[in-house]
Structure formats: C-alpha cells, structure tokens
Image (cartoon, helix red, strand yellow):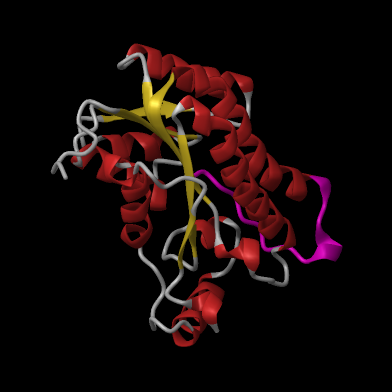
Amino acid sequence: MSEKPFADQYVVVTGGGTGIGRAAALAFAEQGAAGVVITGRRRETLEQTAAEHPALIPVVADVTTTAGADAVAAAITEHGGHLDVLVHNAGIFRNTPLNELDADAVREQLETNVAGPVLLTARLLPLLRTGGNIVLVSSISARMAGAGSSVYSASKAAVDSLIRSWAVELGPQGIRVNGVAPGQVDTAILGVAGVSAEFVADWYAQYATSAPAGRIGTVADVSSWITRLAEPASSWITGEIITIDGGKLLV
C-alpha cells in the first residue's frame, strides 16, 4: 500500500475544525490529499486548524442550508474541481430529558445530524468521482439507550440507515459508503452541549471503568478508521459501520 494513499485526492470534512473532524482532516492531509475542505460555523476555529497544514481549506458554512452546501461545492470547484472523499462528521448532542424537549432542541439535532448529511451529499454528488467514498460518523448511541439522549440516539440510528441505503444506491456509480460508530471520545461535544465539567469527568470515569478496554477513546482512535475506510485498500468494503468503543457495547 502506498505511504500516501490519498495523493492528488480532494476531501471534504464537515465539522473539521475540532475533535474527530480536525484529526481526520489532518490525517488525510498528511497522507497526501491535495486539498481538504474543512467546514464549520466558527471561522476562528477553522482558521486555527487550517494553519496546521497547507492542504487544509477552511470554509465557513452551515451545511444544513442550501447556501452552506453551495459554498462547499464552490470551494471544491475552485480547488481541484472534483471530490474523492466526503466525511460527514458535524454533529450536535443535547442532553435533554423528554419532558423538557422543545421544538428547537429536536430540530437542531435532526437538522445537523441527519438533514445536513443528506442535503450536502445530494449537492456534492455530481462532483464525487467514480471510486469515491463517503464516510459518516455515527455513534454507539444508535444502539444504546440513554436517558436524556433520545433525539440524539434517534438521529444516529438514522445515520446508520443512510449508510446502508446509500451503499446500495450509490454502489452502481462506483461510490462506497461506510461509517464509524464511536463510543465516548475525549472531545468538547459534551461541554458544548452545556454539560458541566464535573459531570463530564464523572461520565468519562464511569465509561473507562465499565468498558473492557479500560479507557475512553481519543480522536486518533476514530480518525484512523475514517481514513482507513476511505483508502484504496478498502475498495471491497461498503455499507459497513465500524464500532470503535473500547468494547462498551459488549457489557
């Protein structure tokens, strides 16, 4: 296998400014990608990440909107003119009991976690080359009950369905579709959701104690599988969802 499996390829990573998305974007760049478009809503974060590698191209965009999807398409057209890998990583988590859910809390999770990938993929499909790849970031929450996370879990179950459906639909076009389903990873997602630092620390400790691997995940644990699923060596894998959780679902 080539040491630079993504040489001369162009990649899009949504939510590429932080966490798993940032790690994946840097991994694609380091493995030879000619250009990696990273999207997000916060310009400063994107620009800070883009400064870490010359192949990273920051695009401030809300990919749940037509304007945001158009902005990403325009960046691809400007840089390379085609797309080889599309990674749907952007996601929102809200820890909200059912009796406290309102329309905004439901809508923002479903729009970002489900509608965003659907609309962006539809917009970018004409640019995605034969032999291209789509990788979606799901979660073990799709298969794991949790109080206060019903809408988030439902959104990730929908992502799992998209992966399988698109693998069948896009296979004849030479496009593979796969996913990764992480368990608890050390990112800022809980803090952004308004969860207290004390709760996060306690939750991490509980997860590490209960998971057979004895720890929570790192962004590298997940990003390495995102790139692995997209590389040419995985050309006979499609419709798969790789669980990366330290064995949490086993117990």
Q: Is residue 176 left or right of residue 104?
A: left
Above or below 102: residue 74: above
At which x and y percent is residue 201? 48, 77
Choose between 2 and 73: the one closer to the eye: 2
Q: Is residue 87 left or right of residue 35?
A: right
Decide: is 132 above or below 79: below
Near-viewer residue (97 or 131): 131
Count the marks: how many?
Answer: 0
Residue 186 position in % (x across, y down): 41, 65
Q: Is residue 28 left or right of residue 238?
A: left
Compared across the picture, whether 99 is left or right of 209 comes to: right
Is residue 203 visible from the viewing direction of this image?
no
Residue 81 occupies quadrant: top left
Q: Is residue 134 visible?
A: yes
In magenta segment, residue 97: yes
Q: Residue at x 62, y 20 (%)?
A: 66
Q: Name, please, the residue furthest toward the bottom.
A: 209
Q: Quadrant of residue 151?
A: bottom right
Residue 3 included in the magenta stretch of the image? no
Residue drawn at x 53%, y 61% is: 191
- The magenta stretch spans which residues? 88-103
By secondary structure, the bulk of the magenta-drawn segment is best described as: loop
Percent coordinates x, y for residue 246 in the rendering: 42, 74
Q: Quadrant of the C terminus?
A: bottom right
